Amino acid sequence: MDKMGHIEIRVVGNEGNNPLTPDNYDIREIRAMLENIEDMLYPGNKKIRPDITYQIGEGSVRNIFKTSLQAVVSFTAVAGMISNTNSIDGLELSTAKAIENIQSIARSKDYSFEIKTSESENIVLKITPQTQYERSTNLWVDAEFYFYGVLVNAGGKNKANIHLDTKETGMVVIETDKVFLKDEPDNLLYKEYGVRVIGKQNLETGEIDRSNLKLVQLIDYSPKYDEAYLNNLIAKASPKFKNLDPDLWLREMRGGYNL
């Protein structure tokens, strides 16, 4: 069994005129905390992450999360860096957004969040209404991307999108024009596609903001090995290389440059 560690996020504030306790800590606050901790600990593919268990305790409100020691150690280092630099630029996008979300809650609810871990006796990160943990918007630029995978969902009542299950990055949700889905004559689901999309990319890290991708083009993508087609290409090319001296050809290609 993997070694376990824990992260504690203590929330200090008031609910109305009463100090915050587990008895008046609303379930929506708990849900937001659960969503944010997953992104803070495991910003990558969540399909293969270890379990995270949750416990709520007294002391204003103490949110305690237990998971793999490796993830806790990594987060402790990240939290320390955030505290020392007063910046979340350069973090993986999911982690940065989770910190931003907690910062937003701190301001809107007038809460203070004190984060400790099993790897440190001291508070490793404190987020208050006065802290300024937001990403620098000038680091994110418009860019175009391609993803390949299986289209597993399409539609939406208010905001149409498609869900593409990719091997490289997991599930990618892409905003789509309703007219495109309405006018598409064929069933799109459970087929392999390439998608051309536009979105934002970080200039420093190269990371893609996968929360705001918009579809430009859907490309039918059915990769397969066609032996007959390949043999035909080889047959067409073979006469041209029949009398070729490969060493001479390579020297001519290199010109005056020798490896």
Image: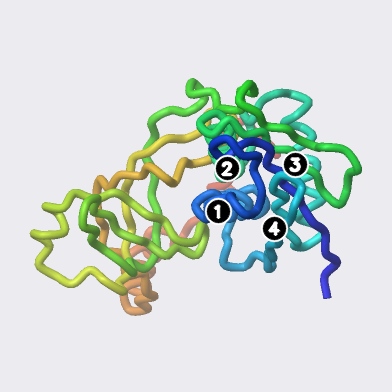
Image coords of residue 22 (percent x, y): 65, 53
Front disc: 4 or 2: 4
Q: Which of marks 1 and 4 is nearer the N terminus?
A: 1
Mark 3, residue position? 115
Q: Earlier in the sequence, mark 4 or mark 2?
A: 4
Alpha carbon of mark 1 to alpha carbon of mark 2: how far?
A: 8 Å
Mark 4, residue position? 56
Front-lying residue, 170 or 16: 16
Q: How crowded is mark 1: few (under 14 residues within 10 Å), some or many (20 or more)?
A: few
Mark 2, residue position? 98
Q: Which color scheme did the rendering employ for the protein?
A: rainbow
Image coords of residue 136 (percent x, y): 54, 23
Mark 1, residue position? 35
Q: Horizontally, is 6 left or right of 63 in the view?
A: right
Q: What residue type is labelled 4?
A: Ile
Are the two marked residues, 1 and 3, in contact with CB atoms closer than 8 angstroms?
Answer: no
Quick check: 63 above or below 188?
above
Q: What residue type is labelled 3?
A: Ile
Front-lying residue, 106 or 239: 106
Q: Earlier in the sequence, mark 1 or mark 3?
A: 1
Q: What residue type is labelled 2?
A: Ala
Front disc: 3 or 4: 4
At 45% from the left and 63% from the top, the residue drawn is 166
At 78% from the left and 48% from the top, the residue drawn is 74
Are the two marked residues, 1 and 2, in contact with CB atoms closer than 8 angstroms?
Answer: yes
Q: Horizontally, is 76 left or right of 30 in the view?
A: right
Are the two marked residues, 1 and 4, in contact with CB atoms closer than 8 angstroms?
Answer: no
Q: Which of marks 3 and 2 is nearer the N terminus?
A: 2
